Image: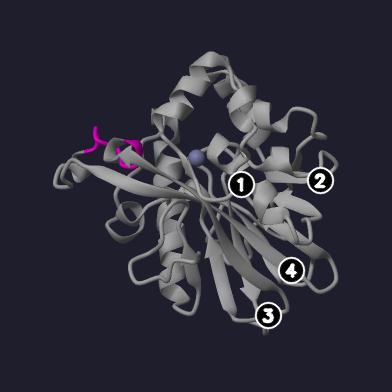
Amino acid sequence: MRPGIVTFERVRFAQWTGGRGTFIDRKDARTAAIPKGNEEAVIYAYVVDHPRFGRVMIDSGVSADLGERLNGLMRRAVSDLEIRIERTTAQWLAGQTPPRAVFLTHLHFDHVGGLLDLPATTPVYVGQGEVQERSRVNLLLGHPADAALQGYGPLREWQFQPDPDGRFAGVLDIFGDGSVWAISVPGHSAGSTAYLINAVDGPKLVLGDAVSTRLGWEQQMPQPVANDARDDAEASAERLRRFAADHPAVNVFLGHQSRTGQAEAL
Ligand SMILES: [Zn+2]
């Protein structure tokens, strides 16, 4: 790998406590040995500064205004999570350079919820297939992601290319210089996207919810997804684990937790 030219920072926005069944598939026999209990989940976003293209944000943090935009059902679901906001995206932005674009890992509310605090002209990118799936999920769940995206321009979808290494479902060298890659990791959602950042202090791999917890990463526990997405979710998680094992210098960032031994940024 060439030496990195971009900087990378993880930012914490909020925390919630959720039953383990939210994160691991209790219908799968492999999870039987994991005791009942809760997991602490953190909402993170990441900031990448590129010397030529400027600042981009991966995922979006949280906005205090999101609650008002949700329908009754979603508002109740979200308040059940008892999200403890440590800082909103608006608070974090004060005194910061605003991002020129947002790269999302996927369109779930805990990843898009901070968009409200960013200018509506900010271009927003997601993985191929994510927008179409969102319309399907919306029929059931209401429009949590739409609430955050309302008033924003059309979502732009990464046009993944075949992976030259044959590892992943698709990859994209976003800036054409090898500094930031979008990686197709479908399963958690149809267009789930991981990002590989070749940063000045070493390569970073942002998984999104392709693998969101230590149970998923370190103990290979399957996550609860719809039946028709299970194979994809497991294949994506396994490809990511293998990539990390083959490249031990890569620092891995799980969707909602820090890895064992990984320093927790403030
Ligand atoms: Zn998610």
Label 3 sits on what residue type? Gly
Residue located beneath label 1 in the image: 88
In primary-sequence order, the first of circles 4 and 3 is 3
Q: How is the image coloured?
A: one colour
Image coordinates for residue 198, horizontal then vertical, percent: 64, 74
Query: Secondary structure beneath disc 2?
Result: loop
Label 1 sits on what residue type? Thr
Q: Name the residue located 47 percent from the left edge and 49 percent from the top edge.
A: 210
Distance from Cα at disc 4 to Cα at disc 3 = 11 Å
- 3 or 2: mark nearer the eye: 2
Distance from Cα at disc 3 to Cα at disc 2 = 25 Å
Q: Assess whether residue 24 is covered by the magenta stretch.
A: yes
Q: Nearer the viewer, residue 171 or 256?
A: 256
- Label placed on residue 49: 4
- Label placed on residue 122: 2
In primary-sequence order, the first of circles 4 and 1 is 4
Q: Is residue 10 visible?
A: yes
Label 4 sits on what residue type? Asp
- Label placed on residue 4: 3
Q: Nearer the viewer, residue 37 or 22?
A: 37
